Image: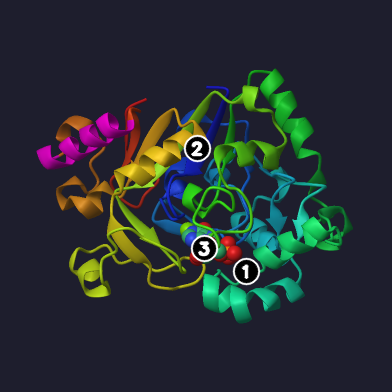
Amino acid sequence: MPCSIVVGGAFGDEGKGKIISHIALKENPSIAVRGGVGPNAGHTVVKDGKTLKLRMLPCAVVNQRTRLMIGAGVLVDPQVLVKEIAETGSQNRVTVDVNCAIIEQRHIEADRAGYLKEKIGTTGTGTGPANSDRVLRFGKLACEEGLLSDYIGDVSLQVNASLDRKEFVLLEGTQGTMLSLYHGVYPFVTSKDVSASAVCSDVGIGPKRVDQVIVVFKSYLTRVGSGPLVNELDPAETVRRGWQEYGSVTGRLRRAAPFDYELARRSITLNSGTQIALTKLDTLFPGCAGVRDYTKLPREASEFVANVETELGRPVVYIGTGNEAEDVIDRT
Ligand code: IMP
Ligand code: MG
């Protein structure tokens, strides 16, 4: 599979980090590239009992052989990125596209006040105001940011060259399709499109380059910030079911609801999804915890998976059953 995209199917926090890290360890991508908005995303990767919370680097950082890139469409917070590079010791394999736009302190301040904070419930990481400046064309670019000088390069050129050599390239989306500026429930969305097509554009590859689009769904829905959530549970019921989660960037309690087939179908369509990854099956069915063999799933769990496949018309190829990158049933 020379080029795969992993995108979130719902409101972010689907567990993309876990699925991406599994694919990265198993398939050895030459390059992994981050598309998406920027450091408003928090991807959690657990490897050998150690938890990494990544906001800028690709989750494929867990594979030492993979080169790590950030596509031109992505907003970079230089402090956050430099800290992650230091923490992961990945200095020698990171490239930031010369055209990435930079998040400055004034963007963060603007994102933590007034309308954005109170009405939209943004992550307060400066991404909306920074994208706004970018559109107005007075944003600062990565090539003008001293902290990043060791990492600047032409990501699109390198990714396309790698694909020409038939190497495996993994593109990582952020947020979720229902937070797309175009296809989500405006205005309760993030500051750009986040579908698979947007990830291509972020990185600088054309749509014909893509072989697989893996859409990640959690076994139930969560959402942080404002906006509609069909069949939302009240906080007490969320806790009773063990579905309570706290935002990895914001620390906020996430709102929760049962799996929504209609929403998921729309997401498959918007992304032209070819495969599905289903995460946190062990939260829905505790008997699944740590299972790595499909035939060992409790019957009600495998019935749920089969129902997702029937309803969405796509194979469920990865199933998350625990926190570790290896806690995955892999049916590829
Ligand atoms: P912003 O992207 O910070 O502008 O926030 C806009 C909306 O998207 C808010 O509802 C946020 O909670 C939500 N959001 C942005 N990024 C993520 C994410 O990575 N996970 C979950 N929700 C997110
Ligand atoms: Mg997250």
Inter-mark Cα distance, 3 to 1: 16 Å
Q: Earlier in the sequence, mark 3 or mark 1?
A: 1
Q: Nearer the viewer, residue 280 or 51?
A: 280
Q: Nearer the viewer, mark 3 or mark 1?
A: 3
- Label 1 CB less than 8 angstroms from ligand 1: yes
Quadrant that contains the C terminus: top left
Q: Which residue is mark 1?
A: 125
Horizontally, residue 140 falls left or right of residue 72, namely: right
Q: Is residue 282 magenta?
A: no
Give the residue type at disc 3.
Phe
Where residue 315 appears, x then y in whole percent?
A: 33, 28
Where disc 3 sits, the SS reads loop
Magenta span covers which residues?
298-312
Disc 1 to disc 2, how far (Cα)? 27 Å
Amino acid residing under circle 1: Thr
Q: What secondary structure is found at the residue carrying circle 1?
A: loop
Where residue 282 sits: x, y (%)? 23, 50
Give the mark nearer the N terminus: 1 vs 2. 1
Q: Are marks 2 and 3 in contact (CB under 8 Å)?
A: no
Q: Nearer the viewer, residue 262 or 57?
A: 262
Asked if residue 310 lies in the magenta stretch, the reply is: yes
Q: Position of residue 73 (x, y in %)?
A: 71, 47
